Image (spheres, rainbow, N blue to C red):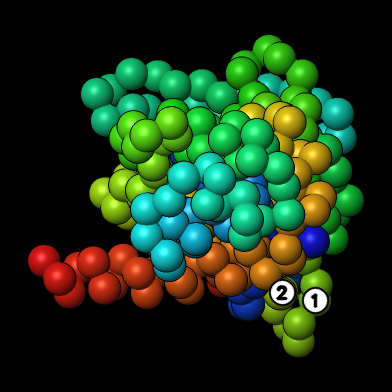
Amino acid sequence: MTAAVDDRLWSAIGDPTRRRLLYLLLACGPSTATGLSAQVPVTRQAVTKHLVVLDRAGLVRSASAGRERRYEVDAAQLARAAAQLNSVGAAWDARLQRIKRLAEAIQRSKR
Amino acid sequence: MDHGSIEREIRIDAAPEVVFDVVSNPEHVEQWWPDGARYDPTPGSTGEIVFTTPSGERAPTGFEVVDAIPPRRFAFRWTQPPGEPARADNSFLVIFELTPAGDGTLLRMTETGFRERGWDDAKVAAEHADHVSGWDHFLPRLTAYLGRLGARR
């Protein structure tokens, strides 16, 4: 059921820039807002805001590294997000199969 | 392009009139989806659908009919709090489109609204974002990544 999907996770992962940041962290390993901002077309301040959203959703973890924070992907939470994305599609597949069975049964009873 | 959408298509051996009734009439909807459905299947009508949680509690969610054009199209918004008007940022939009196919029906379902939820200042940044960072690009990589993680364990 779609309503059970975690809103915070959805909105965190629903944004293209945040997905890009997740990629970069997955592909290149842990990094800071400064390091990441060199690779996306937004300012370091905007990157920081996005990282805070990802952090709140639990998708990344951060640790102090000198004057900045160093971010890395939280694999367990990302796996949960992927499972939820798949489950929404799977839920609709199941509903559509039930629609099909029901409509076909009604049609047969009419013939 | 909306990356936060789900699209499905299914061929059904029943006339479009029958399929339309199944996807729009609350009595039928209860058979394939929620535990309870209370709404009038006409455009603009609001009501609710009810799910039962695993712990046995009643969990109602808002339901608003957007379009009802028999036997071609039925659209609604859901997940808004019951009694509240449906908006782009508090609900999902589901559209059923029916096309005759031989003596059956091709049913196409689209659900959108994921991207708009909790949409904030990120919108400005999103407009500059690279188009390749959409779901179509993201999901296969995510799946591959998770596969690698699984393989390491």
Quadrant showing the C terminus of chain A: bottom right
**Residue sitting nearer the eye, B84 or A23:** A23
Does residue B76 sit above or below A80 in this rendering?
above
At x 55% / y 52%, what residue is drawn? A36
Residue behind mark 2:
B105
Q: Which residue is mark 1?
A: B100
Pick whichever, B16 or B76, lies toward us. Answer: B76
Quarter assignment of residue A107: bottom right
Q: Report helix, strand or loop for mark 1.
A: strand
Q: Residues within 10 Å of mark 1 (few under 14, many from 20)?
A: some
Q: Which mark is residue B19?
A: none
Residue at point 51%, 38% (across, down): A51
Residue B143 place in picture, x, y as percent = 39, 69
**Which residue of the protein is positioned furthest toward the left in this rendering?**
B153
B80 sits left or right of B87 in the view: left
Up-down relation of residue A61 to residue A98 (above or below): above
Same chain assignment for discs 2 and 1? yes
Q: CA distance from mark 2 to mark 1?
A: 5 Å
Residue A66 percent coordinates (x, y): 37, 34
Residue type, label 1:
Pro
> Taking B87 as reference, is A44 above or below it?
below
- Can residue A57 be spotted in the picture? no
The N terminus of chain A lies in quadrant: top left
Q: How many marks?
A: 2
